Amino acid sequence: MKVVRGGTVVESNWSAPADLVIDDGKVQAVVAPGTPVGESAEIVDATGKLVLPGGVDPHCHVGFTSGEFTSLDSYLECTTAAVFGGTTTIVDFAIPRPGQRPLDAAVAQRAKAAEGLCDSALHACVVEWDDTTAEQLAIMAGAGIRTVKMFTTYAGETMANEHTILNTMQTTRDLGGMVIIHCESDAIVADAQNCAAATAGVDASRMPSTRPELAETASVAAILAIAESQGAPVYFVHQSSAAAVELVVDARTRGLIAFTEAVAHHLTLDATEYAGPEPERFVCCPPLRPADTVAGLGRQLFTGNITTIGSDHCCYDTAQKRSHRHDVRHMPNGLPGVETRLPVVFSHYVDGLGLAPSRFVELTATNPARTNGLYPRKGSLMPGADADIAIWDPALEWTVTTGELHMATDYTPYEGRRLRGKPVTVLVGGVVVVDDGRLVDATPRGRHLEAEPLDFSGAFHM
C-alpha cells in the first residue's frame, strides 16, 4: 500500500487538500489529510504540491510513416518522454500504408503497446470505403478501438472522400464509436500552394500562406453538415483558430454531439517562428497562426468551448525537417511535443493567465479519457481509477532545453523557453516511475486499453 500525502488533490470538478490511498495499482480511497493508514504503508510525500491525474494525450503519432518519412520514436521512447511530462496514457493512430487494410494496421500498432512505460489506446483510420470496411470497423470496435481518424487533405495518401466519411460516420455511430477528423480543404490548400509556388515560393518560411485558415474553416463546415445529416458524433483534431472552434460550438447549439481539440503548439506558439533562422522546425498542419489568432484560440479554453488539449506529437528530427526545407509540399509535417504538452500549457495558462487547475485537468486528462472511452479508469483520481498520478511543483521554474528532455529527437520548438510548474514525481499503476526528475523504474508495463462504448449523456465541457 502507498499513500500520497500532503498535497492538494485536483480533479476536473473539485480541488482540496487530501491524501490518496493506493493499492493493487488503483486508487482505493481519497481521505482527509493525515488520516492514519497503518505503519506499513509507503508514503509518497506531496507536501506543497498539486496531485493531478496523469495526463491523457489524445493525439500522438508513434513511429508514424508519411510519404518518405517515419517519425523516430518507439513506444518505449515515446512513453518515457510522456511520463517525464506528466502524461501516463497516450492515444496513438493506426494509419494504414497504401494497400494496407485498416484492421491490419490496427493489429500491428496495438501489438506495440506492451513496449510502453505507460498505457496506450488507439485510433483506427479509414482512407477509402469498400465492401469490407464495415466489418473491419465492427471487429475493431469489438476489440475496444472505437474512434476512427480521417483526413480531408493529403490527396493520394490519407485523404478520404465525403462518401467514405459519411459511411464511416454511420457505422461508427452504430458501433458506439466516433469519427475524428483532420479538417483542411484539400482544394483550397492545393490552390494556395500553387499560387505560392508561382510567386513568393513554398519554402518553410512561407508555410502559413500555403495552408490558410479558410481551408480549415471551410472543411469544418462541410464535415459538420455530414455529421448533422447522420446524427453522428464528431471530434475535430488540432483546431487552430477561434473561428473553427465557434463553428463547432454553433453545431452543438443545434444538438450535434461535436468536440474540439486544441494542441499545445497552436496555443503557445505563433507564426513569427517562421521568420526565424530555422522555420522548418515549426512546419506543422495546420500551421502556426498569427499571434492574435493564437490569443483568440486561447480564450476559448476559459469559455468551455474547447474539449481537450493534445500534443499532435510527431517525433521528427532536424535532418528530416531540413531535407525539403525549400518546399513545404514535401516536408514532414508535425512537431515533437508529448513531453512538453502539459508543462507549456500549465505555465502559460494556469500560472500565467489564471486558468483554474481543475479546468487544466479537465482539458488534459478527464475529457481526453471521456472522449476516448477510457473514463473513469483514466483521467480521474477517484476510488477505482488506475493509480496514474502526476505530482506537480507549481512554483518550480525551469528552462526547456533539448538536452534535458527525453524525446527521440534533436530539437524542441520550445528551446530556451522559461516555464513555471513541472511534474516532479509520476506514478504509473501505483508504481513510482519518475521521482525528483529522475527515471527510477524503466520497466515496460504498457497495456493496450480497450475503449468502452462512447456515452456522451453525462454533462461535461464539450
Image (tube, grey):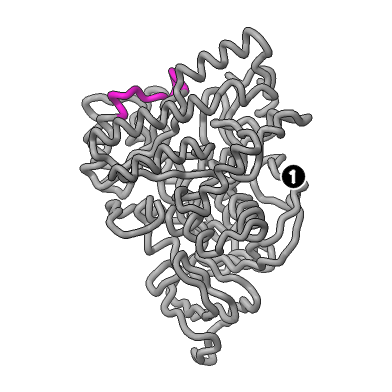
What residue is shown at x 56% (from left), y 11% (from top)?
194
Residue closer to the observer: 393 or 350: 350
What residue is shown at x 25% (from left), y 30% (from top)?
167
The answer to whether 307 is drawn above or below residue 19 in the figure is above
Please tell me whether residue 385 belongs to the stretch shown in magenta: no
Q: Is residue 106 among the parts visible in the rendering?
A: no
Residue closer to the observer: 402 or 348: 348
Please tell me whether residue 158 belongs to the stretch shown in magenta: yes
Per the rendered image, the range of residues in magenta is 154-165
Q: Horizontal and vertical percent for residue 85?
A: 61, 56
The answer to whether 217 is drawn above or below residue 239 in the figure is above
The answer to whether 335 is drawn above or below residue 392 in the figure is above
Q: Is residue 85 among the parts visible in the rendering?
A: yes
The answer to whether 331 is drawn above or below residue 306 in the figure is above
Residue annotated with mark 1? 415
Q: Horizontal and vertical percent for residue 393?
A: 66, 68
Identify the amino acid type marked 1.
Glu
Residue closer to the observer: 122 or 312: 312
User: Which quadrant holds residue 203?
Assistant: top right
- Neighbor class of circle 1 (other Cα within 10 Å; few <14, some 14-19, many 20+) is few
Residue closer to the observer: 304 or 396: 304
* SS class, disc 1: loop
Q: Horizontal and vertical percent for residue 379?
A: 44, 61
What residue is shown at x 74% (from left), y 44% (from top)?
415
